[in-house]
């Protein structure tokens, strides 16, 4: 008898354990059967929640109920409207459930529901998987007075919200839970509806078709890593920065309001033909997603209506004029001239081997280099180092100058309207692969500057300041270094300042010593050697600001009355490195009060030059102490 009772009890226990094991396998835990334990403070309220398993989100309040489901194209709502859900709202809800911590807790019947904002009718959130199993179910209340400090050196205070778990078997406690997403649930859940008319994935976008009152164009690319080009109406390179602005703008474009199409009266078919359109095609898609932007009723309107082809039940109110901190239609570059590459050239500077500067008023200047060698310029049939500052100015202007506008993409044979029939300047660049780029510049009757590449029918307008950056005279291209002057060869330096007798400074390089004489008197005791060495170093490294033509009248007039003169007497060296004699070179400077220019000339060169004020100030330092 005892054996029968024991066997029966054993069978009952085995059956119960079997049911529990089966429940554990199906549910993942026994919380629904035995009840979930209280959440310890500082722990996650939903420790087993996995956002990727959520397939359905239900929101319920006293006013309305909303249902959102996961689809292959993202989250969508089925009630109270059929439309796309804002992915940011989805992320906020799932992140809250997945990460919210219990900062404090209290038994439900000991907390006034009106204070906590947990009375019936407040927002309830339910997350379910694809089988309909509830993964999380809770009611959200108001913010609590508590703040939670995040861990780490840069800890931040984040708000907490009253949260009441509603899953079956939960202990009836209210938690002060980290995070606050209650603003999402205002206005009957309308903020959860995606206000962005277009779903843009910039990395997967293959084509953008744009139609405006100015015409239609198509942007396209062959692959995700290929550059964007304008493929209609012309094949043109694009400006990467402007295309980036367009893509970012389309991604961020957001309606101020969305409404059901049945509640909005849209214009007639006649008006729809005048709509602007932005149509997107992603790689792997055949059909376009078309945004139709309806013309505003008045030119002063700051908003306009729009529809999009893959959301037929929705009408968007889009910002039309530029507004602070939002993207409007006015912020989007939507024309060919907005999107095309406006740079004058796309030169690869490293590949350039020669440059010809052809001017209507001066002989052609030819600058060239061999690989890994210095640039040279040919002046009076003599090759010499080129002025690198002039070269830098030219190359920077060539690659950074941008068109102010494009006058035509179909220039006729007669280019006189732009002054390009008789160019005032032509730049010819030759690359190492023998490719040639020739650009002509002309002035129209209004004095505006235009440019045209030889092989292109496009005429673009550029800023007239471009001409100021191009040196067209051969003497402008002489290297800036004035002379080959070395202190080891110096015997004597005679310095003459306007209104004062010459000061003779004898120099001995062996001990770097100076002797000074003026009007037959030895004034070495008054000489400051540091000043003398400073002047000598300045003379050694002297560079001109700009070379001038030999017949420059302004320079000749100023130099007729010198302000400061240096005569350097130097040793001459023969081919064996021995001293073979001496030579004298005179360096003359004069200031022009009318223009504040400082002119200079060296006795061994017919061309005068200008000098910068800082260098002249260094040379003007008196060597003698007063």
Image (cartoon, grey):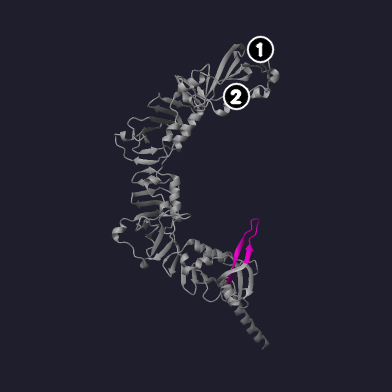
| Quadrant including the C terminus | top right
In the image, residue 578 lies in the stretch drawn in magenta: no
Kindly identify which residue carries mark 2. Answer: 619
Q: Quadrant of residue 147?
A: bottom right
Q: Residue furthest front?
A: 499
Q: Is residue 159 magenta?
A: yes
Residue 242, percent across and down?
A: 43, 47
Magenta segment main secondary structure: strand
407 shown above or below 506: below
Label 2 Cα crowd, 10 Å radius (few <14 / some 14-19 / many 20+): many
| Residue that carries the numbered disc 1 in the rendered image | 520
Q: Which residues are magenta?
A: 146-163
Q: Which quarter of the image is occupied by the N terminus?
A: bottom right
Q: Quadrant of residue 288?
A: bottom left
Crowd around label 1: few <14 · some 14–19 · many ≥20 (10 Å):
few
Residue nearest the viewer, comparing 166 with 54: 166
Query: Is residue 272 visible from the viewing direction of this image?
Result: yes
Which of 105 and 585 lies nearest the eye of the viewer? 585
Please state which of the two labelled residues, at mark 1 or mark 2, is closer to the viewer: 1
Q: Residue at x 63, y 74 (%)?
A: 106
Residue 18 visible: no
């Amino acid at each position: 008898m005892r054996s029968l009772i024991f066997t029966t009890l054993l069978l009952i226990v085995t059956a119960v354990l079997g049911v529990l094991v089966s429940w554990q396998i199906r549910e993942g835990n026994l919380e629904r059967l035995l009840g979930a334990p209280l959440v310890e403070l500082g722990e996650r309220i939903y420790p087993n929640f996995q956002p990727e398993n959520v397939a359905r989100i239900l929101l319920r309040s006293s006013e309305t109920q909303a249902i959102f489901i996961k689809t292959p194209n993202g989250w969508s709502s089925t009630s109270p409207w059929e439309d796309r859900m804002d992915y940011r709202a989805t992320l906020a809800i799932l992140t809250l459930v997945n990460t919210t911590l219990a900062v404090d807790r209290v038994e439900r019947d000991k907390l006034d529901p009106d204070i906590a904002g947990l009375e019936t009718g407040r927002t309830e959130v339910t997350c379910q998987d694809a089988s309909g199993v509830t993964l999380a179910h809770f009611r959200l209340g108001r913010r609590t007075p508590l703040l939670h400090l995040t861990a780490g050196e840069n800890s931040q205070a984040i708000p907490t919200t009253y949260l009441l778990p509603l899953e079956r078997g939960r202990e009836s406690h209210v938690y002060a839970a980290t995070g606050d997403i209650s603003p999402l649930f205002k206005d009957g859940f309308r903020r959860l509806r995606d206000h962005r008319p277009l779903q843009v994935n910039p990395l997967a976008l293959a084509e953008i078709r744009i139609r405006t009152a100015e015409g239609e164009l198509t942007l396209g690319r062959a692959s995700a890593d290929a550059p964007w080009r304008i493929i209609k109406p012309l094949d043109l390179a694009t400006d990467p920065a402007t295309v980036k602005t367009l893509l970012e703008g389309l991604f961020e474009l957001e309606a101020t309001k969305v409404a059901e199409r049945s509640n909005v009266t849209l214009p007639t078919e006649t008006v729809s033909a005048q709509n602007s359109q932005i149509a997107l095609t992603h790689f792997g898609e055949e059909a376009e997603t078309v945004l139709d932007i309806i013309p505003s009723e008045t030119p002063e309107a700051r908003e306009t209506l729009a529809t999009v082809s893959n959301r037929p039940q929705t009408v968007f109110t889009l910002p039309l004029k530029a507004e602070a901190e939002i993207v409007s239609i006015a912020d989007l570059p939507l024309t060919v001239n907005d999107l095309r590459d406006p740079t004058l050239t796309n030169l690869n500077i490293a590949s350039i081997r020669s440059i010809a500067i052809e001017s209507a008023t001066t002989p052609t200047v030819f600058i060239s280099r061999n690989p890994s060698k210095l640039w040279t310029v040919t002046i009076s049939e003599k090759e010499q180092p080129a002025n690198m500052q002039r070269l830098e100015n030219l190359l920077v202007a060539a690659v950074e100058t941008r068109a102010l506008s494009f006058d035509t993409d179909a220039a006729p044979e007669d280019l006189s309207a732009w002054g390009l029939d008789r160019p005032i300047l032509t730049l010819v660049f030759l690359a190492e692969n023998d490719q040639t780029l020739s650009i002509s510049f002309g002035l129209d009757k209004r004095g505006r500057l235009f440019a045209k590449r030889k092989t292109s029918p496009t005429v673009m307008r550029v800023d007239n300041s471009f001409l100021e950056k191009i040196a067209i005279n051969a003497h402008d291209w002489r290297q800036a270094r004035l002379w080959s002057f070395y202190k080891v060869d110096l015997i004597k330096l005679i310095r003459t300042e306007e209104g004062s007798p010459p000061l003779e400074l004898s120099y001995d390089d062996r001990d770097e010593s100076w002797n000074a004489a003026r009007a037959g008197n030895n004034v070495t005791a008054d000489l400051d050697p540091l000043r003398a060495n400073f002047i000598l170093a300045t003379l050694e490294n002297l560079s001109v600001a700009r070379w001038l033509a030999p017949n420059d009248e302004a320079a000749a007039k100023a130099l007729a009355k010198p302000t400061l003169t240096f005569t350097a007497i130097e040793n001459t060296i023969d081919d064996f490195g021995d001293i073979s004699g001496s030579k004298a070179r005179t360096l003359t400077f004069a200031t022009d009060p009318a223009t504040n220019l400082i002119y200079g000339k060296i006795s061994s060169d017919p061309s005068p030059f200008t000098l910068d004020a800082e260098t002249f100030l260094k040379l003007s330092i008196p060597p003698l102490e007063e």
